[in-house]
Image (tube, grey):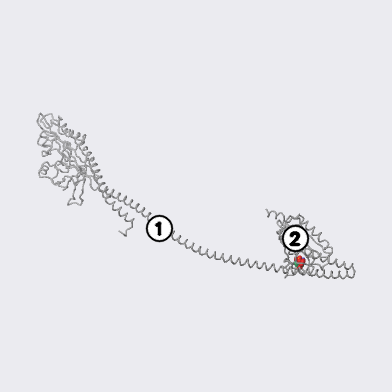
Amino acid sequence: MKNISFRNRMILILLGLSLPLLWLSFALAESYFLRETARQNQQTLRLVISGLKGALLRYQPIPALLAEKQNIVSLLSNDLRRVPVKTINEELKRISNDVGASDIYVIDAEGNTIAANNYDKKLSFIGKNFAYRPYFTQAMKGESASFFALGTTSLKRGYYFSAPIKLDGRILGVVTLKITLEGIEQNWKGNTTEIIATDRHGVIFMSSREDWLFKSFAPLSHEAIDEITNSKQYPIDKLGTLNASVESSSISQADLVNVPAPPDKQQSGNAYFAVSNLMEEAGWRLHVLSPRADASAQAYTVLALSTLAVLFIASIAAMIFWRRAQLVKNMQLQRIAQEQLEHRVQERTNDLNEANKKLKLEVHERTQAETQLRKTQNELVQAGKLAALGQMSAALSHELNQPLAAVKSYADNAKAFLKRNNLERAEENIGHIAQMADRMAELGTHLRNFARKPKQAIDIVDLDTVITAVNQIMSARLKETGASLQIKKPSEQLLVKGGLVRLQQVLVNLVNNALDAMQDSSDAVIDIHISADDEHVEVEVRDYGQGIRQDDINAIFDPFFTTKGVNEGLGLGLSISYNIVQDFGGSLSARNHADGGAEFTLQLQRAQAAQRAAE
Ligand code: ADP
């Protein structure tokens, strides 16, 4: 039991419970169908009896009526006026046809038939003696009688009605009317339910089954056999017994009749569920027998249906259990998957924590490296400052020493001329001293410019104004050197972002450098080419000098870088210009022109674009 799953156990229990239920349903169904069979058989029985009664009652009064007919009475009397037998025969024939009787005949007191409807037939009753028939003997006693028998002449089963023919209290003979019941019997055939009629001895004289005719359920008594033999009621050789057992059942006063298979025949025996009733008028018992197997078959059908229903319910239950088991299994799988997922997440979290630790370490190292870098940078900046300071000191001492030496010598000269009272020469030398002082003051101005405030206000400047100012500032030197500016610019007004004076300072510086580069040529030309797009304005200043040495091209914007001699350049012009342009959000770059000469490109932001950017 341990190996059987809960589901299978439940199915077994269900099946176990359903077995007694099935048995009960079979028993109930069988009893129901038996009751139903009994009820139907009773109904059939009532119909059969009323059919038979109807047939018999129809003919019963006819012989008595015929017996009273004058011509029939006179036939048996010695009446001289009697009608010819032939006429009576004819009349009997007509009446027989009219009422649907098989035969009608007149028998005299000795039992001889003297008139009959079948007078003209080959098997005519005329001349036949029926003194042995009970219907004759009884009628001769003055009573109407009836009798069922096999016709000895016709060999047809028939029912005989007879009535005495009386004249003045004497019984002259008997009128007999015979009917066949084969038509009625024929109606009983054709289905599994058997209908039989037995007489007072229990002999089956009408039957839906041919092989049961003239048989009885139980063997006949000797008296009965003698009586039948004497009356020639049935052919003796056909009499026999079915050896049927009859048990009364508890259902609807029905009997269980068991007819065993006859020893000499191939037919199988059969069990019947039977009802019967007495038909008092004729002294007959009518039986209706239905095969018990029919009810059983119906009960088996119910059993089969019940079994199917049980199986159906069991399969639905199995299905429900199966679905439930699947659900449980799926949930288990889901739980396992979830656990695996959680496990994996935990693993990942651990990995992440590990990676996080590493990252933190790296960040720490980076921070340290950055601090170190910044420290190094600061040191470098400090070193750069010191280098610049050194460079500046060298340049300044270079620039100052020379006028100071000159001042010293002019002062010495002035002193000497004053001693000699040469005031004119003394004044001349003092004038030189004043000039030297001016030069040194100019140097001071340059240095101030270099040390200018980086963030001065930035305006919008008309480039035309700047160019005009540059022309004016440079006019004296241009005139002196015979050089000229060749300016190309678009006709539109170009507003740029910057400061007017500082922009002038930049351009003046570029023009001065260009003139310095071309001081050997007599009619030097400086091209100033201005162009603009939506965003920028470019000012290119090109000369036709020797150009910038390739080695110097990266250094020319450094402060104090100069290739010029003492008193010719401090090396601050381009450095200052570069920073000014940077302040304006523009740029200054230098290159050598492919056709010779240096070309400086000053790029400035257009005022509109600058405004938009500011917005
Ligand atoms: P300075 O003019 O006092 O030397 P700048 O900073 O103006 O200082 O110029 C630095 C150097 O750049 C110059 O000494 C010179 O060597 C070089 N330079 C500037 N302009 C030109 C030019 N138009 N042609 C050739 N070299 C130039």
Q: What is the secondary structure assignment of the residue under circle 1? A: helix
Q: Who is closer to the viewer here, 551 or 563?
A: 563
Within 8 Å of ligand 1, the CB of disc 1?
no
Q: Amino acid at mark 1?
A: Gln
* Front in this rendered view, residue 472 or 13: 472
Is residue 264 left or right of 540 when viewed as pictured?
left
Visible in this render: residue 212? yes
Q: Give the CA separation, mark 2 to mark 1.
A: 81 Å
Can residue 597 be spotted in the picture? no
Residue type indicated by callout 2: Val
Where is residue 12, by image quadrant? bottom left
Q: Which mark is residue 332?
A: 1
Tell me which label, 2 or 1, sits earlier in the chain: 1
Nearest the viewer among 586 and 294 is 586
Answer above or below: position of 186 versus 457: above
Question: Which element type, helix, strand or loop, lies under badge 2?
Answer: strand
Density class for disc 2 (Cα within 10 Å; few <14, some 14-19, many ≥20) is many
Indicate the position of residue 207 as horizontal and vertical percent values.
Answer: 20, 43
The residue lying at 39 percent from left, 57 percent from top is 329
Determine whether, in the image, residue 389 is placed left or right of residue 520. Answer: left
Query: Residue 344's x, y, as percent?
Result: 46, 62
The N terminus lies in quadrant: bottom left
The location of residue 160, given as percent across then percent down, is 16, 37
Say which of 164 and 326 sits in front.
Answer: 326
- How many numbered discs, if any? 2
Q: Quadrant of ligand 1?
A: bottom right
Q: What residue would you read off at disc 2?
A: 539
